[in-house]
Amino acid sequence: MDALLASYAAGGLNAPLHALVGSHLALSGQNRGFVAALEELASQSITEAAPRPLVTRDAMLARIFGAEPVVRSVLPEDPVFPRPLQQLVGRASRDVPWRFKLPGIKEYKIAETDAGEAVLYWVKAGRRLPSHTHEGDEVTLLLKGGFTDPLGHYRRGDIAIADAEVDHTPVADRDEDCLCFAVTDAPLQLTGPVMRLLRKVFHH
């Protein structure tokens, strides 16, 4: 977790992970002080660094002033999506075009590559997700409701991190539907008794 926060403070995360950590900080005060301290250290390092002449200064300025301004749509405050996630998704939580995954599970893929993906999941209260492990890292932010796995219990604003050593079967809390945002850097590997059947569902 500390490494993830340090990468965020240094500006070293990809867009989905940056939005995930930013949303965590918007929802929970647990790590705000730590990240603020890291950002202050990074700022001091930049200030103390010896200045370097910009060899391509004129060309760089021409590109900056010649570029079209980036226009971001202003979305109203959302009761579920923190601002960083809302900007990444580009729509309100009520307008997510969910896709059926399995009974009691829906998904919306925000970004996808051969290496991994960024996905919103809706899980019906009390629903058990398929057992799976990971070829890489899976970072999940709880947005609504909660879930439990062998590593602990997670509620709104919590981050759950799983890697190749974790084989788990998350179970949504019984009192409320669960909504979460997950970012992976490698495909998941289903490990349950119906693995062969579900593998096609989860990778198509």
Image (cartoon, rainbow, N blue to C red):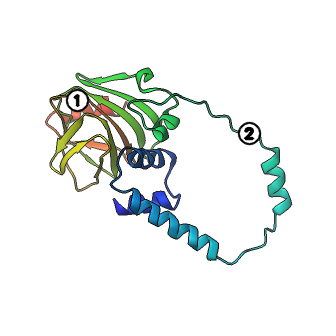
Measured as percent of width and height from the top left, residue 32 is found at 40, 56
How dense is the environment of label 1, judged by Cα within 10 Å: few (below 14), some, or many (20 and up)? few
Q: Is residue 39 left or right of residue 184?
A: right
N-term-proximal mark, 1 vs 2: 2
Near-viewer residue (91 or 115): 91
Image mark for residue 16: none
Measured as percent of width and height from the top left, residue 110 is found at 46, 34
| Residue at (82, 55) in percent of width and height | 61
Q: Is residue 171 left or right of residue 143?
A: left
| Residue at (21, 39) in percent of width and height | 147
| Foreground tag (1 vs 2) | 2
Q: Amino acid at mark 1?
A: Leu
Residue 177 sits in quarter: top left
Q: Is residue 98 left or right of residue 170?
A: right
Query: Image quadrant for the N terminus?
Result: bottom left
- Tell me how many marks there are: 2
Q: Amino acid at mark 2?
A: Pro
| Residue at (19, 27) in percent of width and height | 125
**In this view of the protein, can residue 170 be seen by the observer?**
no
Question: For numbered disc 1, what is the local secondary structure?
Answer: helix
**Label 1, label 2: how many angstroms apart (C-alpha)?**
48 Å
How dense is the environment of label 2, judged by Cα within 10 Å: few (below 14), some, or many (20 and up)? few
Q: Which residue is mark 1?
A: 197
Question: For numbered disc 2, what is the local secondary structure?
Answer: loop
| Residue at (18, 51) in percent of width and height | 151
Image mark for residue 69: 2
Query: Image quadrant for the C terminus?
Result: top left
Measured as percent of width and height from the top left, residue 37 is found at 45, 66
